[in-house]
Amino acid sequence: MKLHEYQSKKIFEVNGVPIPRGRVANSASEVKQIAEELGGRVVVKSQVLVGGRGKAGGIRLAKTPSEAKDLATIILGMEIKGLPVRKLLVDEAVGIKHEIYLAVVDDRASRSPVIIASEAGGIDIEEVAQETPEKIIKIMIDPLMGLQDFQARDIALGIDLPRPLWKNFVQILHGLYNAYKATDASLAEINPLVITENDKLLALDAKMVIDDNALFRHPELIEFRDLDVEDPAETEARKYGLSFIKLDGEIGCMVNGAGLAMATMDIIKQHGGNPANFLDIGGGAGSSKVSAALRIILSDPKVKVILINIFGGITRCDEVAKGILAAFEEVKVKVPVVIRLVGTNAEEGRALLAGADMETADSLVEAAQKAVSMAGEGV
């Protein structure tokens, strides 16, 4: 789950990372009021979960409260990369001497957090990595030991930070790491961390990505979710505890178990088809959950055929069959359905589906071949 800049800054501030004075606004008149409180000269920043806000005109400097209001009126009417701007962050403007990149991110290869820093801040880190990779510093953090002061000082030395700022930098890096750890984040990023004209360090921007699988530990963060950036089908799937990812193909997939779902998608591709989604109904899925899964698949107009592949272990095949029949009663299914049931109560499940208008298959390969043929994608 991605957080907005203003949300990330709240978390940073709690953990001791210095941020500019500022507040969130929902209207142009509110922006003017905040600008007056901050002294007039402010930065008006669109709050949308995409990159390139500045290039799109979504971040503007205002010299007066009236100008801030005028700019806010323009920005609030914008869409940036298809996302509407509904909120604005109004920050005090600061003079900048230098910009630094600083982040803590998961490193799957080493199974540990890694600190990434660069003296070239203010631009995309991918661009820095491609053009001047020598300007990027990476330090792995032992998850049991945590961030050590000497590691923070090594980074300060590596980015050629002025010595008088080292103590403050060490505190900021510890604050960033604590924010990352406390929220089960997969990314906590400051770009840029600036040296101001009065030689202070300040986080001008903030970005955090929270691990969805850890949200049960952080109910206070769930309300931060922005549904504008999520596919409606994925939002609906979450309500029912379904693992769903929308893809671009034409064969809808409903499978129990993530590994089996991946194998099903691979076999569809192997036979010349393209899966329309990843959907894992999980173990022990009852009829209501299966019914919801089928409705979500059918909400995609690109789906030409549905392949249901159920291996009955914890999940009983007869329960899945009941869910399918219930969904058929609720939703008018206009596409063919291929189903493979094997395992616990498979015979009972097949008996329930005997009168339904659908294709059955004894093996996954046979099911995939039938689905691809019906979708007209076979080779």
Image (spheres, rainbow, N blue to C red):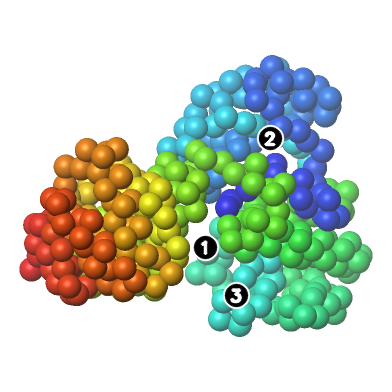
Distance in Å between CA atoms under marks 3 and 1: 19 Å
Quarter of the rendering containing residue 361 = bottom left
- Per the image, the residue denoted by label 1 is 127
Residue 93 versus residue 103: which sits nearer the camera? 103
Mark 3, secondary structure of its residue: strand
Position in image of residue 255 (x %, y %): 33, 63
Above or below, comparing residue 232 to residue 357 in the picture: above
- Per the image, the residue denoted by label 2 is 89
Mark closest to the chain's N terminus, 3 or 1? 3
Side of 113 where 36 appears, left or right: right
Above or below, comparing residue 277 to residue 235 in the picture: below
Residue 344 versus residue 94: which sits nearer the camera? 344
The count of marks equals 3
Mark 3 neighbour density, 10 Å: few (under 14) some (14–19) many (20 or more) = some
Residue at the spot 76% in from the left edge and 74% down from the top edge? 155
Position in image of residue 237 (x %, y %): 44, 49
Mark 1 neighbour density, 10 Å: few (under 14) some (14–19) many (20 or more) = few
Mark 1, secondary structure of its residue: helix
Q: Which amino acid does label 2 sit on?
A: Leu
Residue 322 versus residue 116: which sits nearer the camera? 322
Residue at the spot 54% in from the left edge and 32% down from the top edge? 85
**Label for residue 107?**
3
Distance in Å between CA atoms under marks 2 and 3: 31 Å
